[in-house]
Amino acid sequence: MFNFFRNFFLLFIFTISSAFAVGDAFDQTRFDQLLKEGKPVLIAIHADWCPTCRAQEIFLKDLLKTPPYNNLQVLRVDFDRQKETVRTFKVRMQSTLIVFKNGKEIDRSIGDTDKDSVALMLRKAL
């Protein structure tokens, strides 16, 4: 009986965290293509267990639906499961946001949960 409730709880937590996920799962080939095309890109390094990441996802979800931010291509890197990618971006903490414009990194933030501050950073990529 305990296992049933434990599994149910884990499924519930996974479903909740997936429901708030912003962007598509990171794929190196897709990222390279977006950079080659000169598209504005946001890389969001997140961890499902991270309260700061969840806070970012809540406002990013709404912000990215509105112009001009809806033109950003968003790729989500799982801090715990994509360690090689995390190292490639030289990231030490989850809740890191990195923006690219014309194929080059132009800004990054770590642990920023201020919507206006993040919006300002994202605008630099547009």
Image (cartoon, rainbow, N blue to C red):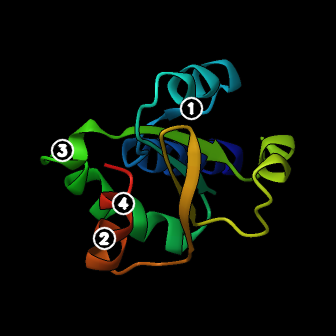
In x, y percent, where is residue 28? 69, 26
Residue carrying label 4:
124
| Distance Cα–Cα, label 1 vs label 2 | 24 Å
Specify which label sits upstream in the sequence, 2 or 3.
Answer: 3
The three-letter code of the residue at mark 3 reads Lys
Residue neighbourhood size for the residue with mark 1, other residues' Cα within 10 Å, grouped as few (<14), some (14–19), many (≥20): some
Which residue: 41% across, 78% down? 113
Q: Nearer the viewer, residue 65 or 109?
A: 109
Is the residue 42 above or below the residue 94 in the image?
Answer: above
Q: Are marks 2 and 4 in contact (CB under 8 Å)?
A: yes
Q: Nearer the viewer, residue 10 or 29?
A: 29
The three-letter code of the residue at mark 2 reads Leu
Kindly report which numbered mark, 1 or 2, lies closer to the viewer in this rendering.
Answer: 2
Which residue: 60% across, 56% down? 46
Q: Are marks 1 and 2 in contact (CB under 8 Å)?
A: no
| Distance Cα–Cα, label 4 vs label 1 | 23 Å
Is the residue 81 above or below the residue 63 in the image?
Answer: above
The three-letter code of the residue at mark 1 reads Ala
Residue neighbourhood size for the residue with mark 3, other residues' Cα within 10 Å, grouped as few (<14), some (14–19), many (≥20): few
Residue neighbourhood size for the residue with mark 4, other residues' Cα within 10 Å, grouped as few (<14), some (14–19), many (≥20): few
| Distance Cα–Cα, label 2 vs label 4 | 7 Å
Q: Which mark is residue 120?
A: 2
Q: Which mark is residue 65?
A: 3
Q: Which mark is residue 25?
A: 1
In x, y percent, where is residue 51? 52, 73
